[in-house]
Image (spheres, rainbow, N blue to C red):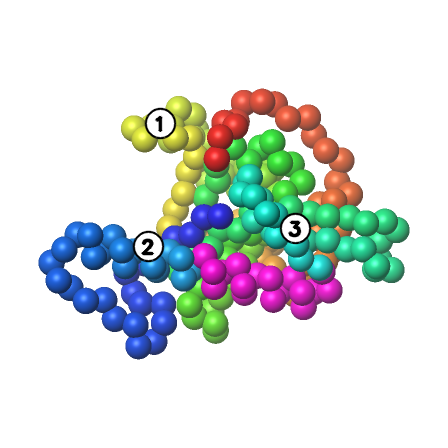
């Protein structure tokens, strides 16, 4: 699971204590990160349950945070399950890592504005859908995507998506509501699987 925070407190009444110590700042950053991760996942689970989906959590971390599934549902003829990778942020963060290419039927769920219940929203895309967005933004032609750049880690991420930006427009069709989640999960599970190219990294 990935989470991004900003410098603002996520919980009313929570305050940072500046004691001039880098260790304290790092500890606070870890706490913020944990809060965002837990809050974002809990919010998403509530949305999925409201959509009529059942939720399971893997016992081990192998790149999948949640599994949304349908069993006793009239809209499907059989048991179906869809893995989900949660990307929670206290801002409007979007990015893509090539390592997810080997999970063509996994949904990447970007949960934005965690900490403000009036603004929290989610976008859900398969790897191919997210790659299409990255292509249109020109990210796949950058050194960061092709070679990993100076950090030697392939991918591309922006931590703030403008309200009227091109990226926000490209993501709009993927913005989720409780009414859309079930349709999205069924669509992903029934979509023909494309062969894995093997070009993406295999480590998490």
**Does the stretch in magenta take in 51?**
yes
To which residue does mark 2 refer?
Answer: 30
Residue at the spot 87% in from the left edge and 60% down from the top edge: 74
To which residue does mark 3 refer?
Answer: 67
To which residue does mark 1 refer?
Answer: 152
Q: Going from the N terminus, do you reach mark 1 or mark 2 first?
A: 2
Magenta residues? Answer: 37-53
| Residue 49 placement (x, y as % from top left) | 67, 65
Name the magenta segment's main secondary structure: helix
Residue density around tag 3, few if under 14, some if 14–19, many if 20 or more, within 10 Å: some
Q: Going from the N terminus, do you reach mark 3 or mark 1 first?
A: 3
- How many labels, in total? 3
**Quarter-of-image position of residue 106:** top right
The secondary element bearing badge 1 is classed as loop
Viewer-nearest residue: 142 or 28: 28
Residue at the spot 25% in from the left edge and 52% down from the top edge: 26
As measured in the structure, the alpha-carbon distance from the residue carrying label 1 to the one carrying label 2 is: 24 Å
Nearer to us: label 3 or label 1:
3
| Residue 23 placement (x, y as % from top left) | 20, 52
Residue at the spot 50% in from the left edge and 27% down from the top edge: 201
């Amino acid at each position: 699971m990935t989470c991004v925070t900003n410098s603002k407190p996520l919980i009313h009444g929570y305050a940072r204590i500046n004691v001039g110590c880098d260790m304290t700042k790092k500890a606070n950053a870890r706490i913020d990160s944990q809060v965002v991760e837990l809050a974002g996942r809990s919010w998403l689970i509530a949305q999925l349950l409201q959509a009529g989906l059942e939720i399971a959590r893997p016992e081990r971390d192998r790149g999948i945070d949640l599994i949304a599934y349908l069993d006793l549902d009239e809209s499907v003829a059989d048991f179906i399950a869809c893995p989900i990778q949660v990307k929670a942020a206290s801002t409007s963060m979007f990015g893509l890592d090539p390592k997810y290419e080997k999970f063509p039927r996994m949904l990447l769920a970007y949960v934005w504005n965690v900490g403000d219940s009036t603004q929290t929203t989610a976008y859900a895309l398969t790897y191919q859908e997210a790659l299409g967005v990255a292509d249109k933004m020109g990210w796949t032609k950058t050194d960061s995507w092709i070679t990993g750049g100076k950090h030697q880690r392939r991918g591309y991420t922006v931590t703030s998506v403008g309200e009227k930006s091109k990226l926000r427009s490209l993501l709009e069709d993927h913005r989720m509501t409780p009414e859309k989640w079930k349709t999205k999960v069924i669509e992903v599970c029934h979509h023909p699987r494309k062969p894995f190219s093997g070009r993406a990294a295999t480590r998490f």
